[in-house]
Amino acid sequence: MGITNALSEALQRKDQDIVNAMGLVKVSKQQLQATRKDGWDFLLDEVYLQLQELNNRFNEVNMELLLCMACLNPSDSFAAFDKKTLIRLAEHYPCEFSKLDILALDTELDTYINDLKSVKEFLDLRKISDLAQRLVETKRDIVYPLVYMLLKLALILPVATPTIERDFLAMNIVKNRL
């Protein structure tokens, strides 16, 4: 089952590229569906189980949240930054971000990205956790409270969403069984 091998390897990497991993999830789902339709009767049950597992573990909401979180990644001088996507992330958390907060976030994100791209101590960061730590060290967490809230949510999301942890376990089970 080489179909899920690339996905499995991407999910196990320490320097996780979540955007590419989510793309591989979609491709793996499509390939498994196509294999199922192509009449591989002797693999039908296994393919169906894998497809069902991927759909359960990587549903549309989880994928949306993970892709939105990737926009906070500070690597390559904030190359992944996308204001519209970060506003969508905030909209997933109506308890933390009121409609007024989301309007303020729009402006805050512009100031935030221009500020951080102009300060050399933020340009060498690789992970979201490093970014959050540096914001606190420089007291920019106070200057950009809404952005900092997004960072905190992004950092706790994998812990708060137990299905994400099970996704990696499920991929190991799928990979080892085959």
Image: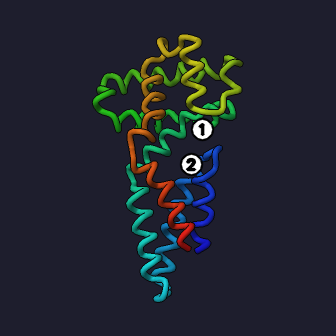
Tell me which residue sits at (42%, 32%) in the image. Answer: 153
In the rendered image of this protein, does residue 138 appear above or below residue 70?
above
Asked whether 29 or 79 is in front, the reply is 29
In the rendered image of this protein, does residue 52 appear above or below residue 130?
below
Q: Which mark is residue 117?
A: none
Provide residue 20's location: percent of width, then percent of height.
59, 52
Tell me which residue sits at (33%, 34%) in the image. Answer: 93
Quarter of the image with the N terminus in it: bottom right
Provide residue 160's location: percent of width, then percent of height.
38, 39
Provide residue 55's location: percent of width, then percent of height.
40, 62
In the rendered image of this protein, does residue 65 appear above or below residue 168?
above
Asked whether 145 or 111 is in front, the reply is 145
Dot 2, how many residues are within 10 Å of its Cα: few (below 14), some (14-19), or many (20+)? some
In the rendered image of this protein, does residue 158 appear above or below residue 10?
above
- CA–CA distance in space, label 1 to label 2: 10 Å
Q: Is residue 104 left or right of residue 118?
A: left
Q: Are marks 1 and 2 in contact (CB under 8 Å)?
A: yes
Dot 1, how many residues are within 10 Å of its Cα: few (below 14), some (14-19), or many (20+)? some
Tell me which residue sits at (43%, 47%) in the image. Answer: 64
Residue marked by disc 2: 19
Residue type, mark 2 in image:
Val
Number of disc labels: 2
Q: Secondary structure at mark 1?
A: loop
Asked whether 70 or 6 is in front, the reply is 6
Query: Which of the two discs, 1 and 2, labels the residue nearer the N terminus?
Result: 2
Q: Which mark is residue 80?
A: 1
Q: Nearer the viewer, mark 1 or mark 2?
A: 2
